Image (cartoon, rainbow, N blue to C red):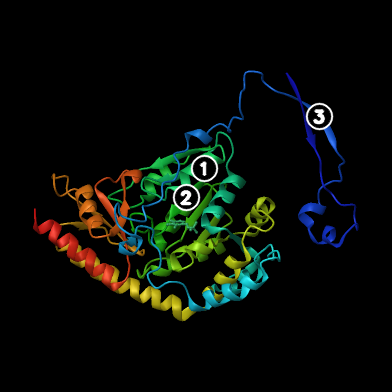
Amino acid sequence: MQGWALAINHQPRAGANCLGSKLSLWSARPVKRAIFSPIQVNAMTERPVPQKGILNIAPYVPGRSSAPGKKAAENIKLSANESPLGASPKAIEAVRAAAEKLEIYPEGSSRELRQALGEVHGIDPERIVVGAGSDEVLHLLAQTYIGDGDEAVMSQYGFMVYPIVTQAAGGTPVIAPETDYRADVDALLAAVTEKTRIVFLANPNNPTGTYLSADELDRLHAGLPSNVLLVIDSAYAEYVTAADYGVGISLVERADNVVMVRTFSKMGLAAARVGWLYGPEHLVDAVNRIRGPFNVSVLGQVAATAAVRDLAFTKALRAHNGQWRDWLTAKIASNRLRVLPSQGNFILVLFPETPGQTASDANAALLERGLVVREMGGYGISNGLRISIGSEDAMRAVADCLQTFMDEQ
Ligand SMILES: *Cc1c(COP(=O)(O)O)cnc(C)c1O
């Protein structure tokens, strides 16, 4: 059977309208009229077939948001590392105002947000790319640098989106073992081959909460060939209290093969879907060529622009998190349970294999009280539960529940 493909390029004639001159993305394409070309259709193919590798992807399974049999109001969601203090009031106000103008396209490059980020972080706005959540940014990086047969290195308990974006781009994820739930620089370097294009590292890491110091990050970078891109995902940077931590900005500034990725999701704007990267000029140029021309909504842009300037809110979130992360860690650790030291807005608790005391038993006890935390089977840590740092009431309820749970054994 033979089919015909019809491709029409809706290219306006130069000067035909004023959009044509503004949108370089479109006007840069050569002018083509309708083109008819014969394509071969395999008679045996009964339906469209996804690209090689796509069906090998294990779909991302988000944490549950409610306990079975509980009404919405009875649940306390501690499964997605969301802000317990809501969003910045200034961001909410900005979204309200923007809701009056939903008919207007966004400014495509998120210029005002990049300017605000540049001012607050002391970095060049021209070297920032904004995405619809850092998930989109990670996809863009993989699409830009990974192709068929290429490899991306990531650590054993690294963020689950990395293998997805790698496979979606046709590449193969290569997993480096961790040492006691912490990324291992030597293992990451040993996993690098001639096929490696990217090394993904969340720092601090989700779901373990552990981190590499700025010196260790430097050592990782120093050991990489210069054609391998180091992606430092600093999603939890705002929550880090360790003095020897480095967010990645200075490495990006010193090197041509390092990019830092950030998100607003863990700082009260998960619904708005805004993430960003800071990288070398050549990377920004390449990524911008495949970025959708209006990839971040107006609502996301205005919310994030207000939030990034609301330093008092960021400070309050950080202080709340530090206080209750320390408190909950100490409480749970006093119950013969291991809590990994966390630099994020969550903790990972490890349970014994003893029947009655397992993570799954503890999860059932927590769900019974409407406390919804993240099961870790999908990450290969079936003895763990990840608990987001929530309100004071939520933290007291979790501590109380786990104490009763362990005392009953
Ligand atoms: C939550 C998270 C992100 C992504 O968040 P978005 O909501 O897509 O911005 C990225 N990396 C890590 C490590 C995360 O935990």
Q: Mark 2 vs ligand 1: CB under 8 Å?
A: no
Closest to the camera, between mark 3 and mark 2, is 3
Rate crowding at label 2 as few (under 14), some (14 to 19) or many (20 or more) other CA atoms within 10 Å. Answer: many
Q: Which residue is mark 2?
A: 200
Residue 45 is situated, as x and y percent measured from the top left of the image, at 62, 22
Q: Which residue is mark 3?
A: 37
Q: Residue type at mark 1: give it.
A: Thr
Does residue 138 sit above or below 313 in this rendering? Answer: above
Q: Mark 1 vs ligand 1: CB under 8 Å?
A: no
Does residue 121 sit above or below 234 in this rendering? Answer: below
Q: Label 1 to label 2, Cα distance in Å?
A: 10 Å
Q: Earlier in the sequence, mark 1 or mark 2?
A: 1
Q: Earlier in the sequence, mark 3 or mark 2?
A: 3
Q: Which residue is mark 1?
A: 166
Q: Earlier in the sequence, mark 1 or mark 3?
A: 3
Q: Label 3 to label 2, Cα distance in Å?
A: 41 Å
Left or right, 235 with respect to 405, comes to right
Rate crowding at label 3 as few (under 14), some (14 to 19) or many (20 or more) other CA atoms within 10 Å. Answer: few
Q: Secondary structure at mark 3?
A: strand
Residue 36 is situated, as x and y percent measured from the top left of the image, at 83, 31
Query: Which residue is at a point 33% across and 47% down the rendered structure image?
Result: 178
Query: Which residue is at a point 57% across and 74% down the rendered structure image?
Result: 96
Question: Can I make out residue 224 in this image?
Answer: no
Q: Secondary structure at mark 2?
A: strand
Q: Contact, CB < 8 Å: mark 3 with mark 2?
A: no
Query: Which residue is at a point 46% across and 65% down the rendered structure image?
Result: 247
Query: Which residue is at a point 46% across and 72% down the rendered structure image?
Result: 87
Closest to the camera, between mark 1 and mark 3, is 3
Question: Is 76 or 282 nearer to us in this picture?
Answer: 76
